[in-house]
């Protein structure tokens, strides 16, 4: 039984139990959400039986989760570096990772990462399907549905916890795109390969046509389907256009089918979206896909942030999370420029953890506001050890604090003029405070 | 005549002319906004007659501007470093700078920065007033209104274009604060010093009582008053509370008085604000202060981002700008930890320029969306020189692009699988595209 099937039968699985405990929810409440499909728990049986240490719930009422993309490319096939990225991502608090390798021996790389991944690991099997077809049949265009299903099965056997399945791009969606025209047309790598195949053969998307076969495999291993958005806007000009929304309608139907089959399912979303359209994007997904967990890439509210798209994406991601998005795929400073380095991975995860937390404060997620309150109390008390411990990134906070240290009990920006310290002293003992201020100002005057 | 007075008399000053040109507005439209007070042009006559090269308009319908804070502290008095920060800030596109020095010879530092500042420079004269009182009278608590007025006049004479005046904190505001209680009480450095003085003497704020005298000086030099928010929330728990909103009411009255006196005026705002309260904060200021330009610090939608508060602030700043904020004061990675370094200044300015631009897209500022469209077109065309030139930070974009270079015409993330490239080729010549894809996949297969 999948988590969804078990929950529907009223069973509180050990995984539901663990997630409920971590999120501070009653297990029965969480079971209902899993049964409805508004929460998924990506935990492939194979991974679960081996090294999946962190059980992660994604969806309504839970902490917003952050995914870090890893993986080789045509230009950079360095497995040691990918292992390092995985370790960095887990170290700084990524909730999940995805192996998006498109260079080297894809299966060997995945197995290496899988063996080290203590968090759920996702993948995009379409790459491997196409590479295998090219290898075996001499051309990616000889690829057929069996190649897709075989790749999906291989990934499932290897323990992949969630898979991006680009089943929502159809000939009708491509027609909407061609009729309308677009600024950046298709920016999904898996979706683009699929669209090329469809355009070449003028044939329907095999993943759409054989979605039930895909679901069969997913069910066997309890892999969570992550419905890919091949036609996501890749520039703000393309946001919320007809091809994007047509695909969303198809994804809504596929959500129904997956749930009916007892397969856990979530929906992927944009992409490049102006800030004032993010809320509407979230609303559209939640309505059309009947509350399926929403997993967005960024979103990026501007196209011009290259080099700093972790910030662009964190801005969009924070508003998305506050509007109800459940799962954020990070964007690194290398986005639009090249394959990220381990340092880019670190920066991307932190930026998106900030975004997710800002969203969680708005969502009213348990413990979110309380964390901020503890930090502000430590700040007011000038308790530096507590402040550094409570910082979302204690390492970087300590680094800067020590680099720019102060001779005073406050920080080196305000020093003796720290307003919190001053007011606290005045509220407690105005006479003593007065004397202290006098001494400091006197000292300053003498120094000049 | 100040810009405000001139505009009211129907005069299009050379400064209005320049700002209109830069913003792509008709000068007459801009003149009306300056006359109404919904736009200010901070340009002290003294600075204007010397080295003020960039004339900057702030307010309704204009591009959102970004300010970078500079200045020494008790712990770090390094004038060369402050000069470097000023240069870095101007280089990466800060629209204005503020000298917030509280260490060393304040006037000499200001004059050094002033002589190099080609953009409007702001200051907070309360620091100098208090230091001078301490020096001359042996205690900051012997300070009186003349010390304040003298410091303000000195700053005006030195050419300061806009000054933070903490005239809105009153005994009644302090009463609201004490009755209610707060998490971080007061986090404004100038406001904190003033509050300490008020609490010690149990006397009204001299800047409030003698606001007309302050306005007289401002008018003479055409300094723009930036009404400081001494009681701004310094933790999200304190956002939109009674003391904050009481001060905002007082600031609203002071806006009326400044405008009546022909003095240009804007209003400073928070601070730490949960993401879902930002829009309401902006609305409250715009209504209560009758459309006066709104200048916010961040805002920061979480308290736990120490080490990364440029990102926290950019998230809040983007939403603030999109909601109608006119002017963003940057926050650097060093916020809450220490005095920023030149590298922190660089990072802070870029992060907030991204936030401002994201807001400008939503506001419909002229040229904002067009910039993104040009970038996306260059991206789709794989025109790398154009993409790097169009990046908000061309230096960092090039750095990463070269660090992670590709052997292909695309970037090293997707390489030959660049979906934009693939689709473009298919749309143009499917047969040729097919052959290219075949070759690449063949090569990949052979490499393994």
Image (spheres, coloured by chain):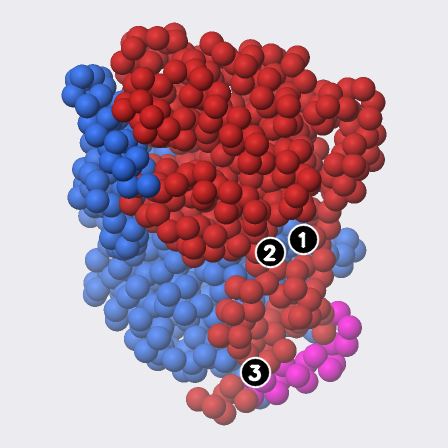
Chain colours: A red, B blue
Q: Which chain hosts label 2?
A: A
Residue drawn at x 70%, y 33% as measured from the top left: A61
Question: Closer to us: mark 1 or mark 2?
Answer: 2
Q: Which chain hosts label 3?
A: A
| Chain-order first, disc 3 or disc 1 | 1
Q: Decide which of B229, B6 is in the foreground and name it.
A: B229
The spot of residue A441 in percent (x, y) is 56, 84
Residue drawn at x 63%, y 81% as measured from the top left: A437
Q: Give above or below for A343 relative to B422.
A: below
Q: Decide which of A412, B186 is in the foreground and name it.
A: A412
The spot of residue B197 in percent (x, y) is 64, 72
Looking at the rendering, the stretch of residues picked out in magenta corresponds to A427-442
Q: Give above or below for A16 relative to B200.
A: above
Residue ranking furthest to the bottom: A446
Q: Which residue is mark 1?
A: A372
A176 with respect to A200 (left or right): right
Q: Which residue is mark 3?
A: A407
A8 with respect to A230 (left or right): right
Mark 3 to mark 1: distance in Å? 27 Å
Q: Secondary structure at mark 1?
A: helix
Q: Decide which of A236, B323 is in the foreground and name it.
A: A236
Q: Are marks 2 and 3 on the same chain?
A: yes
Q: Quadrant of the C terminus of chain B?
A: top left
- Residue A429 colored magenta? yes
Question: Closer to us: mark 2 or mark 3?
Answer: 2
The spot of residue B419 in percent (x, y) is 31, 28
Mark 2 to mark 3: distance in Å? 25 Å
| Chain-order first, disc 2 or disc 3 | 2
């Amino acid at each position: 039984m999948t988590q969804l099937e078990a929950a529907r039968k009223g069973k509180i699985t050990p995984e539901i139990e663990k997630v409920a405990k971590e999120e501070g929810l009653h297990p029965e409440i969480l079971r209902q959400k899993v049964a409805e499909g508004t929460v998924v728990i990506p935990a492939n049986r194979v991974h679960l039986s081996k090294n999946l240490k962190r059980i992660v719930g994604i969806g309504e009422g839970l902490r917003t989760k952050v995914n870090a993309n890893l993986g080789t490319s045509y230009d950079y096939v360095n497995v040691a570096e990918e292992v390092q990225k995985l370790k960095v991502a887990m170290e700084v608090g990524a909730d999940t990772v995805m192996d998006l390798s498109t260079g080297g021996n894809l299966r060997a790389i995945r197995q290496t990462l899988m063996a080290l991944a203590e968090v759920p690991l996702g993948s995009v099997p379409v790459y491997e399907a196409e590479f295998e077809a090219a290898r075996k049949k001499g051309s990616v265009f000889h690829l057929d549905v069996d190649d897709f299903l075989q790749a999906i099965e291989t990934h499932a056997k290897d323990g992949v916890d969630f898979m991006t399945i680009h089943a929502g791009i159809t000939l009708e969606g491509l027609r909407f795109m061609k009729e309308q025209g677009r600024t950046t047309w298709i920016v999904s790598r898996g979706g683009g390969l699929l669209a090329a195949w469809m355009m070449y053969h003028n044939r329907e998307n095999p993943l759409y046509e054989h979605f039930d076969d895909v679901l069969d495999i997913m069910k066997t291993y309890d892999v969570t389907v992550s419905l890919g958005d091949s036609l996501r806007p890749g520039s703000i000009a393309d946001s919320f256009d007809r091809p994007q929304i047509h695909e969303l309608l198809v994804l809504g139907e596929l959500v129904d089918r997956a749930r009916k089959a007892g397969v856990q399912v979530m929906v992927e979303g944009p992409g490049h979206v102006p800030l004032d359209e993010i809320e509407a994007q979230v609303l559209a997904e939640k309505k059309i896909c009947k509350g399926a967990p929403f997993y967005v890439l960024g979103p990026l509210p501007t196209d011009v942030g290259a080099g700093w798209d972790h910030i662009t994406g964190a801005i969009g991601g924070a508003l998305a999370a506050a509007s109800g998005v459940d799962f954020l795929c990070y964007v690194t400073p290398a986005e639009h420029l090249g394959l990220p380095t381990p340092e880019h991975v670190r920066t991307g995860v932190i930026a998106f953890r900030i975004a997710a937390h800002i969203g969680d404060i708005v969502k009213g997620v348990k413990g979110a506001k309380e964390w901020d309150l503890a930090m502000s109390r430590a700040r007011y008390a000038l308790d530096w050890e507590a402040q550094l411990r409570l910082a979302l990134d204690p390492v970087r906070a300590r680094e800067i604090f020590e680099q720019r240290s102060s001779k005073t009990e406050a920080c080196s920006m305000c020093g003796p003029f720290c307003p919190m310290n001053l007011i606290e002293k005045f509220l407690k003992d105005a006479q003593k405070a007065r004397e202290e201020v006098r001494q400091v100002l006197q000292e300053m005057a003498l120094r000049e």
